[in-house]
Amino acid sequence: MRLILLAALAAAFVAAISAGAVKIDLFNMSEIERNILFDVRLPRVVLAGLVGAALAMSGVLFQYVMKNPLADSFTTGVSASSAMGAVIAIMLGLMPYIPLFALAGGLAGLYLVYRIASDRGRIQPITMLLAGIVLSTFASATISFMKFLSDDAVSSIIFWLMGGFQAATVSKDLILFGVICLSFLVIRGDYLKLDILCFDDTTASSTGVDVHGLRKKLFFAAALLTSFSVGYAGIIGFVGLIIPHILRLGNFVKASYLLPASLTGGAAFMIATDLIARTILQQGQELPVGVITSSIGGVFFLYLLIKRRKELFYFN
Amino acid sequence: MVGVLGNNGSGKSTFLNVLSGQMDFAGGYRIGGRNFKEISHPESARRIGFLPQEAALNMPFDSFYVVLTGRFIHSDGQMYSEQDISCTEEAMKRFDVYHLKDRLFNALSGGEKQRVLLARVMNMDTEIFLLDEPFSGIDILHQIRIVEMLRQLRMEKIIMVVIHDLSFAVQHFSRFLFFRDGLLLYDMARDELDPEKLTDIFGVRVGFVEQDKRMFVYTEEI
């Protein structure tokens, strides 16, 4: 199964760097094609892969924290509050600091949701979802209000909210790669604990896992991943929700399988959807990638829900 | 082996939660001569195996893996060893759930789940076991097998069991803690059991009948 994921990632990557507005024959490139490949396309494809990996992993982490299959960066309100932070940065004209503002917004939003949804350290999943939805709504309203206030920043805000990888650069790639490596290394040693966290808190804690400490760590890692993704690529829905589910249905159940697989699967999915987004229209026009993720992802997820309903009930 | 008895809401579960360190408490208690509050969290898990009254799992793990996670305190935290795996097989065989090892835990029946969870706790191999209603949902055959198994361990382990079936408890346990209204009222050995005190504790008339050297307990409304 792991091999299939890796093969899918490799195939998506090769297809994505050769196809596009200008077709590139990888084995026979002209000077211009070489420039396009290395200056534009490669950074973009890599960014798409990294954002996909980060969002999928953050979805997995949120689902561990919240013990809820509906948890991801969207339903917890982190995406929207990150976006709010980013839009504030745009409004203030502080473009280089967008990721920082997104991170601050994301963490603040997450903290708020966590405080509202936890009662003496226990997270109440329903309250969490409601709080996340309220926060999302509030953040969206704030964003709309800011759009209304500033005419000149509107177009860059709208680009932002639709999500996309047009603004990819090598340095963004490197930073996001660093963030993913950092989160992955921080979590890597905790695979067994993550599995135990799937029990109720009392069982988990009496088995020897510091439930609250671990949860805080996961929370922070997930928020970091989401915020940087949102900071570089805007809001892209559904990846964090759908990739972990598909992987679990494909029998990636233990954390030691699920987490690495979420990185590969998320990257492959995002590269492929970005490829579709920029090649499906004629004359080099692009669809926002969020449209593709949500429609493909949504249809596929619906299929799974109907066809394999039974296996989804494992969350009680 | 100690039976913990009392009506609903009398404080039995709270008592076990406190002893296992799952709930904050005022005052203190000693475990092996050391103040419990000085024992840090992972170490307390190494000494006390706790089976809470209600357990839930929200990941499609097979039963074998569920029992294996009981070995976490003995593992290096990264991977389960060969020994952990053989202990798990052993524990599952002892609790007669080895044939369920490949089934999804959440697809099991209530009683089977409970037996798997018991195997999981016993797999922790701690010196103290606190079991909150371990027999709920388990058939008579397995109840008797399990209680016999616990009895065999009683010389080397401290085992505390919350139980509602008074006559089952009288048959198999040697020491009793009785709770009422949040208070620990009595700590009695089996030969100190007194129908009047029990009547007072449970709010039903309790009587003992001895036949063929066996003690039978009957209960009726006052």
Image: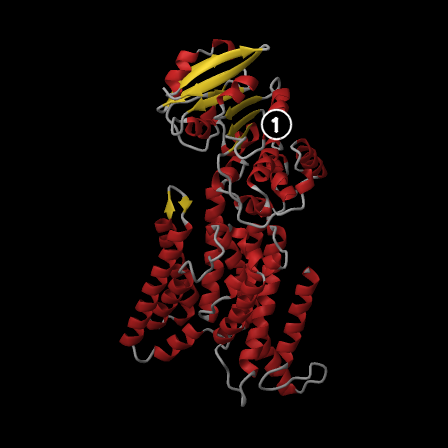
Foreground of the two, A59 or A171 = A59
Indicate the position of residue B103 as horizontal and vertical percent values: 64, 46
Query: In percent of the image, x 34 and y 78: which residue is there?
Result: A154
Q: Amino acid at mark 1?
A: Ile
Foreground of the two, A48 or B95 = B95
Quadrant assignment, res B171: top right
Colouring convention used in this rendered image of the protein: secondary structure
Indicate the position of residue B174 as horizontal and vertical percent values: 54, 15
Q: Residue furthest bottom?
A: A283
Q: Is A90 displayed left or right of A1 in the figure?
A: left
User: Which residue is identified by label 1?
Assistant: B146
Q: Chain of mark 1?
A: B
* The N terminus of chain A - image quarter: bottom right
Whether residue B78 is visible, yes or no, is no
Foreground of the two, B98 or A158 = B98
Query: In percent of the image, x 46 and y 30: which residue is there?
Result: B21
**Residue A31 position (above or below residue A255):** below
For label 1, count other residues whose C-alpha is less than 10 Å away and answer few (under 14), some (14-19) or many (20+): many
**Residue A310 position (above or below residue A230):** above
Indicate the position of residue A257 as horizontal and vertical percent values: 63, 54
Q: How many numbered callouts?
A: 1
Query: In percent of the image, x 55 and y 57: which residue is there?
Result: A312
Q: Residue furthest left?
A: A149
Secondary structure type for disc 1: helix
Indicate the position of residue B162 as horizontal and vertical percent values: 49, 26
**Residue A62 position (above or below residue A22):** above
Whether residue A35 is visible, yes or no, is yes
